[in-house]
Image (cartoon, helix red, strand yellow):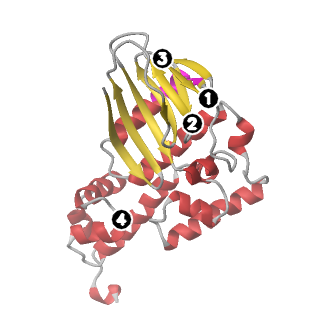
Amino acid sequence: MLSTRTIFECDGLRIADIACRHGRGQGAAEEASGYGIGFVRRGCFARRAEGTRALLDPSSIFFVNSEEEQRYDHPHTGGDDCTAFLLDAELLASLWGGDPRLPAGAAHSPPELDLTHRQLLADAARADDADEIFERTILLLTATLEGSSRRRARSGRPATEHARRRLVEDAREVLAADPGLPLPTLAARLAVSPHHLSRLFGAATGHTISRHRMHLRTRAALDRLAAGDTNLARLAADLGFADHAHLCRVLRAETGSTPSALRAALRLQPELAG
């Protein structure tokens, strides 16, 4: 028996928890329905695809290409558990040198990469900020792909320091007008891949694009509170927070204060507000 539970879905990316409880023996051939990168968390199985056999255990990462014929065999009882990162062709191509086709077979999962994936899976199940989970996933998958071909994963990176600095400034300019712009859309507008934009932005500013968005949303919330806004649900919806509880958590994390305390402290006098 195979069960798939979607943990997160956004902008052409889906993270799924896959639990396989097949008994020992050979599986049935099937056609892959899309592109994916899988991390094995528990168990052991063999995957056959395009004439290649790969034995997979919790130290393994495997790659699935759309429409390829595959088969999963199980040498032991007890089943297995995997995390699947499923990507549409356009998003995957933007991470992988313009071509979505993934490497054949499997790759080793270093301990730090495996831990990062497990932390991401746990955080995705309870996250308020979809932008943060999306950006962290893009960075994880790019690090995974670089193990197969650093050249392909890094193709399209701005070549000079001036170009990289200008790219970050352009991204900040766009986000100032529209903090909610999804990372793939922002990257496409700036003619760069999402992971290059995320990495260069982090190197230049010391924080991720998703964190920068939250900084901008927090400043906008402070401005609205200073003007006397009391409807937190409407404020959260207007500014792109998940809900008013998310707004309150972010404001407390960013400022150490509650919305009501901030409203009282920042409230402008009518003559100043005008």
Q: Earlier in the sequence, mark 1 or mark 4?
A: 1
**Which residue occupies 34% across, 11% down?**
77
Taking depth in this image into account, of 169 and 240 the one nearest to the observer is 240
Q: Do labels 4 and 2 touch, CB within 8 Å?
A: no
Which of discs 2 and 3 lies nearer the camera? The answer is 2
**Which residue occupies 76% across, 59% down?**
162
The residue where tag 4 is placed is: 240
Residue type (three-letter) at the residue carrying disc 1 = Glu
**Which residue occupies 40% across, 13% down?**
25
The residue where tag 2 is placed is: 68
Residue type (three-letter) at the residue carrying disc 2 = Glu
Which of discs 4 and 2 lies nearer the camera? The answer is 2
How crowded pointer 3 is (Cα within 10 Å; few <14, some 14-19, many 20+) is rated as: many
Label number found at residue 57: 3
Percent x, y for residue 28?
44, 25
> Mark 1 and mark 2: span between their CA atoms?
7 Å
Residue type (three-letter) at the residue carrying disc 4 = Gly
Taking depth in this image into account, of 254 and 68 the one nearest to the observer is 68
User: Where is residue 193, by image quadrant?
Assistant: bottom right
Q: Which residues are magenta?
A: 107-115
Percent x, y for residue 215?
44, 60
